[in-house]
Amino acid sequence: MSLFYEILAGVWVRNGLQIKGQAMTYIQANFCNSMVDMDIYWLQICAAHLPADQFLDMCIDMFGVREWLSMTPLSPAQAAEQDAMLEGLLTFLAILVSSRTNLGNDELTQSRLEVSTLLAAGDKTHSQLLELMPERSGNAHTRNFETVLKELSTYRAPPRGSENLEQGLFVPRAEVWERHYDPLHVLRRAVHRRDFHASMDRFTAYVREKQKAESGGAGSGTGGGAASGSASGAASGTLWPPLRPALPPPAAAGDPRRICLSGKTLYG
């Protein structure tokens, strides 16, 4: 996992485009089930059963950020590299404690998460969604696809009278943003980082529209100007990603959330 984040941080830039291709292959839909998902699962098992301080110490060394954390003076180039690696470490730890892809999710729950992740990044055609669904053994990724797609999206037909051949697009329902959108899972599946930023922009637009509608409804009976202005002002800034609480995993598997109890390494 640390090598993947090193590639994203530009540590291996001298290896050319091939090294970026390896990182994309590692997380793309055709291979993620047997690559990144399985790596995260095994690391979750390690986190659940190793002493928390020992596990976090190993992570800090693997990501190469001990100098940054110890406030050692760094050159600008070293500081930029370790800034990126520290972001990678924190993202990795957040995914490690919260992901339930192989640690509790049933097929239907995972299908909802994957479809929501794809819709969050942009409106897509049926063929695009089906192609980008992560492959799972036994065609589990397609078994609930149509049911989940109907549940989480609205079909928008192509414009009439257009001279170009266009396909209709599936647009996320409000339920995607309210219940299923997981920015960490988008990061995990995003071959291009712009997909994550696009999903956050779309989430922000949804929140602003919702607040605008609510403030308009509340203000219609009370003069509304101040309430509307307050709501629009609150929605004008950059929103925090809507991180979701980590659900408890199956008891027999152990709980990777226990690394958050590490006192000496995490907080000391």
Image: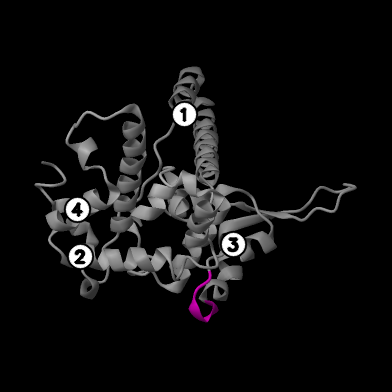
Residue under label 2: 48
Residue under label 1: 235
- Of badges 1 and 3, the one in the foreground is 3
Amino acid at dot 4 = Leu
The quarter of the rendered structure image containing the N terminus is bottom left
**Circle count:** 4
Q: Earlier in the sequence, mark 2 or mark 4?
A: 2
Amino acid at dot 1 = Ala
Q: Nearer the viewer, residue 195 or 216?
A: 195
Q: Earlier in the sequence, mark 1 or mark 2?
A: 2
Q: Nearer the viewer, residue 32 or 123?
A: 32
The answer to whether 142 appears left or right of 222 in the picture is right
Cβ–Cβ below 8 Å for labels 2 and 4? no
Task: Residue 56: give its label.
Answer: 4
Residue under label 3: 132
* Rendered location of residue 260, percent (x, y): 18, 52
- Of badges 4 and 1, the one in the foreground is 4
* Rendered location of residue 184, percent (x, y): 40, 50
